[in-house]
């Protein structure tokens, strides 16, 4: 089977490499020539644990190209994994998906199945199939299948090779059989449903996770006021199998390329259909304010950041990725800079991307020690293992004034019992 994948981002490249690792010949297509040149040399353009190694191992089964015609013309299956970012009104921007659909329509010379992995609003797969059928050669049959992606950045390779489920949304049973064959050697339960249900499973799943995060964050905020400890509360809640213990970590809110846009897109779609999903709207509202939680906390300690040295640990939206999309650092650091702070930031993989936004305004530090040196306050935005595993005495040793605002609850409170540090985290008593 010849497989093509359109888009070599977090979803497309991981999908392509994992499919190659299962014995398929995979053509990975991207419009970004720089990315393609890197991949041709066996270098992954994104940071994703395990991806480079797997890619290098299977280079002879992978072709990287910008030449979509040669990739699509005789492919049996074409995956679409391009971005579907948020439009100003909150709806999903399908321009990239339709560009690929147009390129497929003008290229294919034999029957094929087009598989939409990108997250798209309910009904989009039907529209893409109609679009393709109206444009392809008359002697060519094309079927569209929805195959939403559930990987999480940071664990994308593992999530793909051992997925919690593979959802296959089809209107044509033969297309379902072909996809089952494609995924034959993947260790995951497979579920075949109609296309609209598959599209809805993706949004409903992501939005439920976003809701769970906003819920625990609201409970955490109340814990601070009433003197409870969110760590204990989450642990106690999570022991109930009906609730489950994952996604109950309180913090400064979700970011990334998916939860923010997928909550807004479903809300938009509901409104477009004269419906309202009140719970999702609330999740969005809570998250929008939770992002600023540390800045608000900082006001307890300083009236202004003018002239202060601020240490920032973590720039990416979560550990294990170099992705900055919707990262809390991107809304908080501008406030600190505008207010006159000198910002010293550390992140193990996010600096190159951050420099695209702030090339010179921030001092980027190679070590945590350097970032903490002489700081008047420290903000933790990402729970990188290096941060979680460090000895908290370092804050006292290096900082001018050891005030630590932790947006990710990296340390147990008793880690601070023998040091003189103000440690203010989310949903837990302040240690002074
Ligand atoms: P991304 O922005 O990382 O990658 C998209 C890639 O598509 C880019 O490399 C871009 O250059 C390329 N591209 C654009 N137009 C193209 C074209 N005409 N032909 C070929 N390539 C083209 O995006 P992503 O994070 O991988 O997300 C892709 C989709 O998967 C989105 O719909 C997203 O919602 C969904 N998704 C993402 C994740 C995630 O964790 N990132 C998880 C599940 C689902």
Image: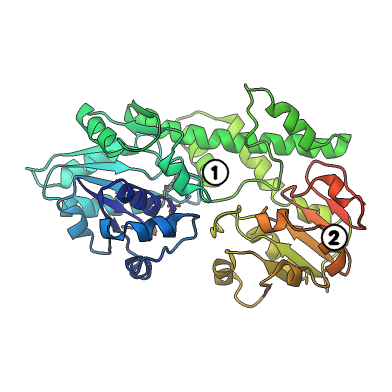
Quadrant in the picture for residue 115: top left
Q: Which mark is residue 246?
A: none
The residue at which mark 2 appears reads as 393
In the image, 62 versus 431, the foreground residue is 62
The quadrant in which the N terminus is found is top left
**Callout count:** 2
Say which element carries label 1: helix
**Residue situated furthest front in the rendering:** 57
What residue is shown at x 84% (from left), y 51% (from top)? 424
Quadrant in the picture for residue 329: bottom right
Sequence-wise, which precedes: disc 1 or disc 2?
A: 1
**Residue situated furthest left in the rendering:** 139
- Specify whether 351 is left or right of 386: left
Say which element carries label 2: helix
Q: Position of residue 35 (x, y in %)?
A: 38, 66
Question: Which one is in front in this view, the residue at disc 1 or the one at disc 2?
Answer: 2
Q: Residues within 10 Å of mark 1 (few under 14, many from 20)?
A: many
Q: Position of residue 226 (x, y in %)?
A: 88, 34
Q: Position of residue 99 (x, y in %)?
A: 29, 54
Display colour scheme: rainbow
The residue at which mark 1 appears reads as 259
Residue 171 visible in the current orientation: yes
């Amino acid at each position: 089977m010849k497989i093509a994948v359109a888009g070599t981002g977090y979803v497309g490249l991981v999908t392509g490499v994992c499919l190659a690792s299962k014995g398929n010949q995979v053509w990975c297509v991207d419009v970004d020539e720089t990315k393609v040149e890197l991949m041709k040399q066996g270098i992954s353009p994104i940071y994703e644990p395990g991806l480079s190694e797997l890619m290098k191992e299977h280079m002879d089964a992978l072709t990287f190209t910008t030449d979509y015609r040669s990739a699509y013309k005789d492919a049996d299956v074409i995956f679409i994994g391009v971005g579907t970012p948020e439009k100003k009104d909150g709806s999903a921007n399908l321009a990239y998906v339709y560009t690929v659909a147009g390129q497929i329509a003008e290229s294919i010379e034999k029957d094929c199945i087009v598989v939409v992995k990108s997250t798209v609003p309910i009904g989009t797969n039907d529209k893409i199939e109609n679009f393709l059928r109206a444009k392809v050669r008359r002697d060519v049959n094309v079927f569209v299948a929805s195959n939403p992606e559930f990987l999480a950045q940071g664990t994308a390779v593992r999530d793909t090779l051992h997925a919690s489920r593979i959802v296959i949304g089809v209107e044509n049973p033969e297309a379902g059989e072909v996809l089952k064959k494609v995924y034959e050697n993947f260790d995951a339960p497979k579920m075949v449903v109609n296309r609209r249900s598959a599209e809805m499973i993706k949004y409903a799943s992501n939005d439920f996770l976003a809701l769970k995060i906003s819920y625990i964050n609201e409970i955490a905020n109340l814990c601070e006021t009433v003197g409870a400890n969110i760590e204990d509360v989450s642990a106690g809640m999570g022991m109930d199998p009906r609730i489950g213990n994952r996604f109950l970590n309180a913090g400064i809110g979700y970011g990334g390329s998916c939860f923010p846009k997928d909550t807004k897109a479903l809300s938009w779609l509901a409104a477009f259909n004269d419906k309202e999903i009140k719970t999702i709207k609330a999740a969005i509202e809570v998250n929008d304010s939770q992002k600023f939680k540390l800045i608000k906390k900082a006001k307890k300690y300083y009236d202004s950041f003018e002239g202060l040295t601020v240490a920032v640990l973590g720039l990416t939206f979560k550990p294990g990725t170099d992705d900055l999309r919707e990262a809390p650092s991107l809304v908080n650091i501008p406030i600190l800079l505008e207010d006159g702070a000198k910002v010293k930031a550390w992140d193990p993989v996010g600096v190159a991307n951050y420099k695209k936004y702030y090339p010179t305004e921030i001092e980027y530090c190679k070590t945590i020690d350097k970032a903490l040196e002489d700081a008047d306050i420290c903000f933790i935005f990402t729970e990188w293992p290096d941060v979680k595993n460090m000895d908290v005495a370092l804050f006292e040793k290096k900082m001018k004034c050891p005030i630590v605002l932790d947006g990710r609850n990296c340390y147990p409170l008793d880690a601070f019992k023998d040091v003189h540090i103000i440690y203010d985290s989310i949903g837990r008593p302040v240690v002074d």
